[in-house]
Image (spheres, helix red, strand yellow):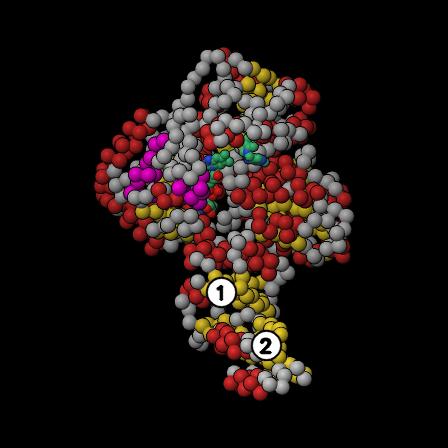
């Protein structure tokens, strides 16, 4: 099962390899990982998407907690915490005579921005939930995706309260 | 006053109350060694290999309960520490390892004698640090000692570039540590404890299963009181062995692969298993599906990752053992009548267990013609005091020691359980002897393992450390040979150590003393002679070559499917 996990860590060098080492050391794949400092620059926030058997993931979360540099771990999926998830992707799509209008139509529907244009391509910027991202990719595939890059999902708990 | 990094390091060690360090010099730690000459508070012991230095620091830590300290130079010196660090990590031993590193400006350049120790030791340390600014050094060392010693203990590595050692700053040792990501929980949850008491009072067939955590928590006294209060049979792991006297009427000895018949059968029939600072290692559980099949499991451990890792747990209690045991004892004291009832309702169970002890004792077939290793262990026990410190290497001799040496005091049995490191015992004995110059320290060794760190004879002689080394010589890598005999149709591939060694001459070459015999009737006499000889001594016993460690749970089998004799 897919799990979305947030890890708040000391913003120090080497932390990323400690966290990723916990996954790779157990033969676990990290599907996506995004990391950047928080408002408090001494803390970095990671959002990790991974999948695996619940029992093993419980062990991984405990191990993450055990790292000296880890301040907090939230397994949104495991704990059943309500949360919102958003991802940003940039897609370079083939846009020639016959398809330009179709690409623009899809861009419109998904509220994408066109951020680069050439006579043969459009580059779109799209932000949304994992479902929305998956849907737009499906629609653009037949037209021709030359390249795409995604941030991986970011997650934040719902409600008024912060992680502390 | 401004001090250099290397001076700060030594000042920090003094502040931590470190009196002995084990280390080996080289280019990137030469400044530290220069300053060390001026320190009269810190004794430095020079092993003959960095791996041995780390094992010595480990032996020192296990024997004393203090943090062991080892030093190595960058590159090959540092990589030589890896096996020692992994050994300490697997057995949760508090240790700080200081490694020299190339100057910060050269890091990552494949500089001379550079090795990425932070990367290499990440999975085998509790934490590690690369110090990049001398201003951080005192804080980092304070944290390193704190992390090594608290919670579930473990080794911490500090990588110290040469330019940080020579740079200067004002020295100030912090009074306290504040790590927002590291706050070990010592206090067991009172509600969980109350639930545990309920389960205990309802049990008809309880078994206590004790691991190395009892020693790490210094909770041996509380443990004995607890077992006696509820009158439950108690088995230990290899690591928990010395924390409960084997001759105690409630003792079942060791469980697991080479454990006693009655310990394994008791666990198999139990209706309640109280796991205390033990981590359900696969050597202990055998096939998981048949491990303690009828038992509810209470698991007390300071490290949440130990809980539910391998087995299901009905009641977890996270906390320090001493704290939890004291809370349990307090609650039990409040209900004397119910405890009384529980003790009565478990009478039949104790009788059942005692009957198994009588019907299937831990034995061997004695011999008048060849020396039986088990006989040597029994003789050694007879001729030593209760506070003797025994270390072992890894193999059959280690298991015979666990099975036949009757330990009675905590921190008297030092052995590599988790990693199973051949070559551990001799340097660990060295470290223990350095900590306790007046106690008797014995390394029980195999002919194979001994050769993995035999160079430490020189260190023993140089430092007048009178360790007695007993080599149970079967001219085999015996433990592997046993597996080949039982599971590979006696195909002894690369386990026969051809070209026998003259251990007496070897001892002599180092300036130690050696004795040898192959006659059972001489065993006692030689042990007495060796114990009366000052300084380090090798005592070689040429033992029956194809003796096996029995009983044994074959790999993949349940612990109730033990093979009793081969
Ligand atoms: C050849 C060979 C054969 C072996 N055969 C056997 C065998 O037959 N039987 C056997 O038992 N072992 C055997 N071993 C050893 C085995 O591999 C493991 O090392 C051992 O079983 C682990 O012991 P343990 O569970 O006590 O864990 P340890 O490694 O001692 O772990 C200690 C536990 O206590 C916890 N702890 C630490 N401090 C505290 C505290 N203050 N409060 C509470 N909890 C704390 C830790 O978190 C950890 O979970 C063998 C080893 C070798 C090399
Ligand atoms: C460093 C290391 N290498 C290999 C092993 C695998 N191994 C386990 S026991 C053993 C044999 C040990 O032989 P010896 O020291 O003579 O002890 P014996 O079993 O004969 O008593 C070996 C090779 C190990 N545990 N450690
Ligand atoms: Mg041998």
Q: Is residue B350 left or right of residue A23?
A: left
What is the chain letter for disc 1? A
Question: Do the numbered discs 2 and 1 sit on residues whose CB atoms are within 8 Å?
Answer: no
Above/below status of B367 relative to B442: above
Residue closer to the observer: B469 or A21: A21
Q: CA distance from mark 2 to mark 1?
A: 33 Å
Q: Is residue B406 visible?
A: no
Give the residue drawn at x 34%, y 47%. Answer: B297
Above/below status of A128 relative to B242: below
Above/below status of B462 relative to B43: above
Residue closer to the observer: A128 or B88: A128
Mark 1 lies on a secondary structure that is: strand
Give the residue drawn at x 38%, y 37%. Answer: B559
The local crowd at label 2, few if under 14, some if 14 to 19, many if 20 or more residues have their Cα within 10 Å, is some
- Point out which mark residue A144 bears: 2
Residue B171: image quadrant is bottom right
Q: Is mark 1 within 8 Å of ligand 1?
A: no
> What residue is disc 1 on?
A5
Quadrant location of the N terminus of chain A in the rendered image: bottom left
The residue segment tinted magenta is B261-287
């Amino acid at each position: 099962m897919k799990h979305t996990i947030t890890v708040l860590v000391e913003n120090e060098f080497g932390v990323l390899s400690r966290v990723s080492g916990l996954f790779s050391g157990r033969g676990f794949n990290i599907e996506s990982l995004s990391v950047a400092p928080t408002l408090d620059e001494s803390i970095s926030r990671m959002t990790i998407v991974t999948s695996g058997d619940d029992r093993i993931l419980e062990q991984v979360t405990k191990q993450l907690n055990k790292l000296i540099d880890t301040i907090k771990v939230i397994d949104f999926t495991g704990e059943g915490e309500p949360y919102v998830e958003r991802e940003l992707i940039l897609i370079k799509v083939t846009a020639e005579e016959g398809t330009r209008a179709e690409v623009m139509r899809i861009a419109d529907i998904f509220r994408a921005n066109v951020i680069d244009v050439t006579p043969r391509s459009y580059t779109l910027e799209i932000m949304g939930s994992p479902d929305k991202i998956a849907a737009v990719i499906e629609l653009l595939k037949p037209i021709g995706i030359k390249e795409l890059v995604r941030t991986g999902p970011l997650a934040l708990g719902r409600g008024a309260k912060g992680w502390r | 006053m401004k001090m250099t990094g290397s001076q700060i390091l030594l000042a920090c060690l003094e502040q931590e109350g470190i009196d002995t360090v084990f280390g080996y010099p080289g280019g990137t730690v030469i400044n530290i060694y220069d300053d060390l000459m001026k320190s009269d508070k810190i004794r430095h012991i020079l092993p003959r290999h960095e791996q041995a230095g780390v094992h010595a620091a480990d032996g020192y830590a296990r024997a004393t309960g203090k943090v062991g300290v080892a030093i190595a130079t960058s590159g090959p010196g540092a990589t030589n520490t890896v096996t020692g660090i992994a050994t300490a990590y697997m057995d949760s031993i508090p240790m700080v390892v200081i490694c020299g590193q190339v100057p910060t400006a050269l890091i990552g350049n494949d500089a001379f004698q550079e090795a990425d120790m932070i990367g290499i030791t990440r999975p085998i340390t509790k934490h590690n640090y690369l110090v990049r600014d001398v201003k951080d050094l005192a804080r980092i060392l304070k944290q390193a000692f704190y992390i090594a010693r608290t919670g579930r203990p473990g080794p911490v590595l500090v990588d110290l570039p040469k330019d940080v050692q020579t740079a200067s700053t004002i020295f100030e040792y912090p009074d306290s540590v504040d790590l927002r990501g590291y706050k070990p929980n010592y206090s067991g949850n009172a509600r969980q404890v109350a639930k545990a008491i309920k389960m205990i009072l309802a049990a008809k067939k309880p078994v206590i299963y004790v691991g190395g955590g009892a020693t790490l928590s210094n909770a041996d006294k509380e443990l004995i009181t607890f077992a006696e209060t509820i009158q439950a049979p108690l088995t230990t792991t290899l690591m928990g062995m010395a924390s409960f006297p084997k001759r105690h009427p409630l003792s079942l000895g060791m469980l697991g692969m080479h454990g006693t018949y009655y310990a394994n059968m008791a666990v198999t029939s139990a209706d309640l298993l109280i796991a205390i600072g033990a981590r359900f290692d696969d050597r202990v559980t055998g096939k998981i599906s048949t491990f303690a099949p009828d038992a509810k499991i209470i698991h007390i451990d300071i490290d949440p990752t130990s809980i539910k890792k391998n087995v299901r747990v009905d009641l977890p209690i996270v906390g320090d053992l001493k704290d939890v045991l004291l809370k349990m004892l307090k609650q039990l004291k409040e209900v004397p009548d119910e405890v009384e009832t529980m003790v009565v309702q478990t009478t039949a169970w104790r009788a059942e267990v005692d009957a198994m002890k009588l019907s299937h004792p831990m034995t061997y077939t004695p011999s008048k013609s060849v020396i039986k290793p088990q006989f040597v262990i029994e003789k050694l026990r007879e001729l030593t005091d209760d506070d003797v410190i025994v270390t072992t290497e890894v193999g059959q001799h280690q298991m015979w020691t666990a099975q036949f040496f009757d330990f009675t005091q905590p921190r008297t049995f030092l052995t590599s359980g988790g990693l199973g490191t051949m070559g551990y015992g001799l340097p660990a004995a060295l470290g223990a002897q350095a900590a306790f110059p007046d106690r008797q320290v014995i390394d029980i060794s195999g002919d194979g393992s001994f050769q993995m760190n035999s160079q430490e004879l020189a260190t023993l002689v140089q430092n007048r450390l009178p360790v007695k080394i007993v080599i149970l010589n079967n001219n085999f890598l015996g433990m592997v040979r046993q597996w080949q005999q039982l599971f590979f149709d006696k195909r002894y591939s690369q386990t026969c150590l051809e070209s026998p060694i003259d251990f007496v001459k070897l001892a002599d070459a180092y300036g130690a003393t050696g004795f040898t015999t192959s006659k059972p009737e001489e065993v006692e006499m030689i042990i007495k002679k060796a114990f009366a000889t000052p300084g380090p001594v090798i005592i070689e016993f040429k033992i029956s070559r194809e003796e096996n460690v029995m009983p044994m749970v074959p790999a993949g089998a349940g612990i109730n499917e033990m093979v009793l004799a081969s």
